[in-house]
Image: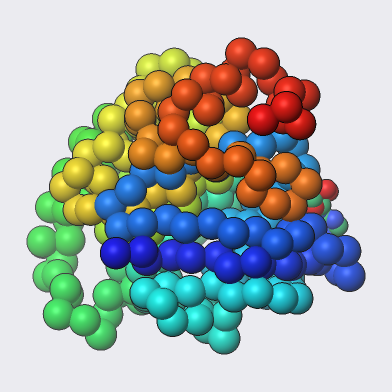
Amino acid sequence: MVILELRDVWAGIEGKTILKGVNLVVKEGEIAALMGPNGSGKSTTAQVIMGHPKYTVEKGDILLDGESILGLSPDARAKRGLFLAFQYPVEISGVTMANFLRRAYLSVHGESTRKLSVSEFHKLLVENFKLLQMDESFAKRYLNEGFSGGEKKRSEIVQLATLSPRIAILDETDSGLDIDSVKIVADSIKRINEDKGTGFLVITHYARILNYLKPDVVHVMYDGRVIASGGFELAEELERKGYAALNTI
Ligand code: ADP
Ligand code: MG
């Protein structure tokens, strides 16, 4: 049942240790939230799970289906079903969203039986743009170029819905979104979770998106460790008291 597990993960960048023994589990079909103050190591955790080459895992293990993935490249991890929506989505000039998504889809699912014809793929894209309430003309635009902050974040979720990973990590996808967009993003996450059983690790600062999502579990990170885990009430408590109260949890 457990799919993604971090076991006592110590990791750093350029000789500086940032994660100091992270223990974390994301189960199949679960929506988990990861909260914590700026600089506590949330984005580092996301990058280390995906295998970003800039980070070094010093100790511990990351397992998918009980098997270590530490030796796998980011591409191989994506093929195994991991997906990361970036805190700062990149713009790619000259590559349309449709082409980007098609190539990403083939790269992740190419060898599997889930190959789709061009017209089936187009149908999938149209559905996913609709899910995120984006006009399908975005498919013809260059990836994220000239997109507003909110459109960039929604385009990341279109990508997620198209690739249909087993575990999706969203790094502050709700930051900078207006209230309507937060609801659209949250509704889409719930739909993907319910329809496809995708497990989510939602990194966020705000209880607002979690109010819509009603996560199964909330984890709190502080100084490179997960120091508390609990139900939604933990997010509400943090919203009320602030992270300064963490040492009382
Ligand atoms: P969060 O996402 O929780 O805000 P991060 O994982 O981005 O935290 O960062 C954790 C800590 O690692 C911060 O103190 C940050 O300054 C440090 N850090 C991140 N990237 C680098 C880097 N390239 N070089 C040195 N320190 C870094
Ligand atoms: Mg961050």
Compare residues 20 and 114 and report the one nearer the observer.
20
Q: Position of residue 85 (x, y in %)?
A: 49, 51
Q: Give the quadrant of residue 3.
A: bottom left
From this view, report whether residue 188 is shown above or below residue 182: below
User: Residue at the location (44% across, 28% down)?
Assistant: 232
Q: Give the quadrant of residue 39.
A: top right
Quadrant containing the N terminus is bottom left
Compare residues 75 and 135 and report the one nearer the observer.
75
Q: Is residue 67 left or right of residue 187?
A: right
Q: Give the quadrant of residue 105.
A: bottom left
Count of marks overlaid on the render:
0
Q: Position of residue 49 (x, y in %)?
A: 56, 65
Q: Is residue 16 left or right of residue 82?
A: right
User: Residue at the location (37% across, 43% down)?
Assistant: 31
Quadrant containing the C terminus is top right
Residue at the far right in the pictured view: 15
Q: Position of residue 83 (x, y in %)?
A: 43, 60
Q: Is residue 242 left or right of residue 130?
A: right
User: Residue at the location (10% across, 61% down)?
Assistant: 120
From this view, report whether residue 113 is shown above or below residue 26: below
User: Residue at the location (36% across, 64% down)?
Assistant: 2
Q: Position of residue 52 (x, y in %)?
A: 63, 69
From this view, report whether residue 169 is shown above or below residue 3: above
Compare residues 2 and 195 and report the one nearer the observer.
2
Q: Is residue 149 visible?
A: no
Compare residues 129 and 35 and report the one nearer the observer.
35
Residue at the far front in the pictured view: 248
Q: Is residue 204 visible?
A: yes
